[in-house]
């Protein structure tokens, strides 16, 4: 099943047709007019998008997590997550020190 999905992704990414997005593990891949690829509204070069697509289709969970983090980093989600985590950690420290 994974090899078929991998072949589908390769044929989509190599084609010139850009009308429909391609979904890989819940991530939306879209081709832009400039030749780059939008993944969840973050712009990636074609080679980066190919690598991320293959990583997301991999059976290796570490590879899939690495691709997920790269996408989150590029579209700003990772920064928001780290900021919320830091604020929560700060609140816990403040509550601990007040006691």
Image (tube, rainbow, N blue to C red):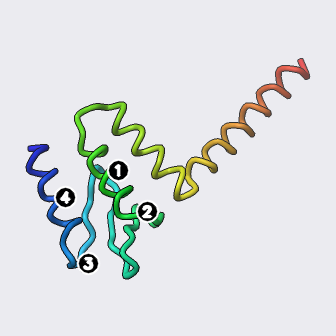
**At numbered mark 4, what does the secondary structure look like: helix, strand or loop?**
helix
Residue linked to disc 1: 52
Task: Compare marks 2 and 1 and give the one earlier in the sequence.
Answer: 2
Task: Compare marks 2 and 3 and give the one earlier in the sequence.
Answer: 3
Mark 2 and 1 residues: CB-CB less than 8 Å, in contact? yes
Residue linked to disc 3: 18
Looking at the rendered structure, the number of numbered marks drawn on it comes to 4
Where residue 97 sits, quadrant-wise, is top right
Please report the residue visible at 77 percent of the width from the left and 27 percent of the height from the top: 92
Task: Compare marks 3 and 1 and give the one earlier in the sequence.
Answer: 3
Expressed as whole percent of the image width and height from the top left, the position of residue 91 reads 79, 33
C-alpha span from label 2 to label 3: 15 Å
Expressed as whole percent of the image width and height from the top left, the position of residue 17 reads 20, 79
Where residue 34 sits, quadrant-wise, is bottom left
Left or right: residue 17 compared with residue 88: left
Please report the residue visible at 13 percent of the width from the left and 43 percent of the height from the top: 2
Expressed as whole percent of the image width and height from the top left, the position of residue 77 reads 55, 52
Outermost residue on the right side: it is: 98
Residue linked to disc 2: 44
> Does residue 72 sit above or below 36 in this rendering?
above
Task: Compare marks 4 and 3 and give the one earlier in the sequence.
Answer: 4
Outermost residue on the top side: it is: 99
C-alpha span from label 4 to label 3: 13 Å
């Amino acid at each position: 099943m994974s090899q078929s999905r991998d072949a589908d992704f390769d044929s989509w990414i190599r084609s010139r047709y850009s009308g429909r997005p391609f979904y890989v593990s819940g991530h939306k891949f879209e081709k832009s007019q400039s030749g780059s690829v939008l993944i969840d509204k973050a712009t990636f070069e074609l080679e980066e998008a190919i690598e991320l697509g293959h990583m997301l289709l991999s059976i290796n969970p570490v590879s899939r997590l690495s691709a997920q983090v790269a996408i989150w980093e590029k579209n700003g989600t990772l920064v928001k997550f780290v900021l919320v985590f830091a604020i929560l950690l700060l609140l816990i420290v403040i509550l601990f020190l007040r006691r």
